Image (tube, rainbow, N blue to C red):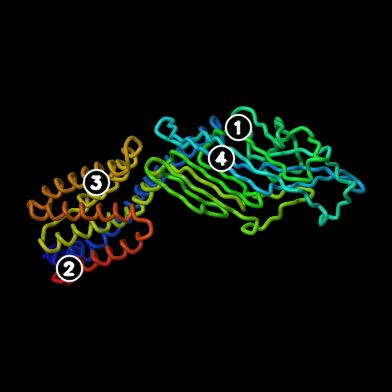
Amino acid sequence: MEISNHDHNEKPNTEPNINFMRSTTAKIIMVGVLTLVLLIPLQYVKNLIEERSQSQKKTEEGITRQWGDNVFIYGPVIKVPYQTSSSIEYAYLFPEKLAADADVQSESRRQSMYEASIFNAKVKFAGNFGTPDLSKAAILPENLQWERATILMNTNGLKSIRGAVAVNFNGTKYTMEPVANEYTADSLISLETKPINLSAARSGKMPFSMDVTYSGTKRLGIAPIGKITETKMTSNWHSPKFSGYILPEKQSVSDNGFSATWKISQLNRPFAQQHLGKLPNLKGYSFYVDLLIPVDEYQQNMRASKYGFLVIGLTFLIFFLIQSISKISIHIFQYTMIGLALVMFYTLLISITEHSSFMAAYLIAGISVVAMITLYSISILKDRKFPMFIGASLSALYTFIYVIIQLENYALLAGSIGLFLILGAVMYFSRKIDWSK
């Protein structure tokens, strides 16, 4: 009789616990915790994408070391020594007119699964120097050593130059050689002629022409040092990015390449035509063209993975609503399998992207995961109506995310509208659920 009373006393204590574990609240908590747990493998996927992206950058750096660096051109400039009370200093004179014509032939160079853009650029310079006037520089005319003047050109690296460099000045050809020059602007190297006697020639216009051939990667930049600088650049590369202090006056981009022209006056930039002591660093006042790889697929993979939490949360929400409406029981283990399948989408995406395009990889990975979850949900839900709805919902969700990834200017607007519509749909389908159970 005592044993019977003991059993009778224990029953009221265990029943509420059993009821709570079967309640809607408990199921919501478990699904929520599982969603947070799945952020751990999702973070590992993001780390994998970042690691592969770093491998891409290292490959680009390797190609850069072998082929040539970004190219920056600064010249030609007349360099005139003058005597001070204690030492020899230098005056630098910029051209009155500078015209540059650059023909840039580009291609994509691959190493293993990665690629970088390389180019060969033939740059032709022409123009003239005007009559020098250093009267405002507080230099006595007798201290200027015109007979020891030279012509120099600055660049960011000699490895990129192909062949000899010579300048045709006043009808005479002068070879340019690399020199150690403490007066050169930061991180630039000088090519300089031997002394040219300008004692007689400096009284009039001094024409010049110069051809330089470069091999480089990604970027070509030119300093607009002429009182009037006119530049034309043509290329077979179809994905340029124009940047720098001044954008092109005209530009045309097509699948066959691009052309761009710049016309820059002395009034358009904040530096003078003459400098004493040291050449200024003009990289910040120059114009550039970057030859971009059309699509940064690792960046798109990273953007896709950032929506992983949204995909997992909405998918679990769909299953939970179906479970609540249809009274079909879905075990937490089955939720786990569905969540892992959703995480696998991103590993499939990054691995297939490295051997194909992002669009093809997204399509293959999306179809594979949607098909897997749809077939798995047939066995869970014992019906074809709900699994077909799940398949359609996942297809719409992945399509929605792909559209957002492709958009740039309207990504936030499209994402906000889409999430608003999703919230409205959830509110509509959950309005008749009895949350008291």
Q: Which residue is mark 1?
A: 161
Q: Which residue is mark 3?
A: 366
The answer to which of marks 3 and 1 sits earlier in the sequence is 1
Of tags 3 and 1, the one toward the viewer is 1
Secondary structure, mark 1, is: strand
Q: Kindly indicate the quadrant of the structure image that contains residue 371.
A: top left
Q: Which residue is mark 4?
A: 70
Q: What residue type is disc 4 on?
A: Asn
Q: Which residue is mark 2?
A: 430
Say few, some or many: other residues with alpha carbon within 10 Å of mark 1 (under 14 / 14 to 19 / 20 or more): some
Q: What residue type is disc 1 on?
A: Ile
Secondary structure, mark 4, is: loop
Q: Nearer the viewer, residue 17 or 271?
A: 271
Q: CA distance from mark 3 to mark 1?
A: 47 Å
Q: CA distance from mark 1 to mark 2?
A: 69 Å
| Horizontal side of residue 163 vs 359, given as left or right | right
Please report contact status of discs 1 and 2: CB closer than 8 Å, yes or no: no
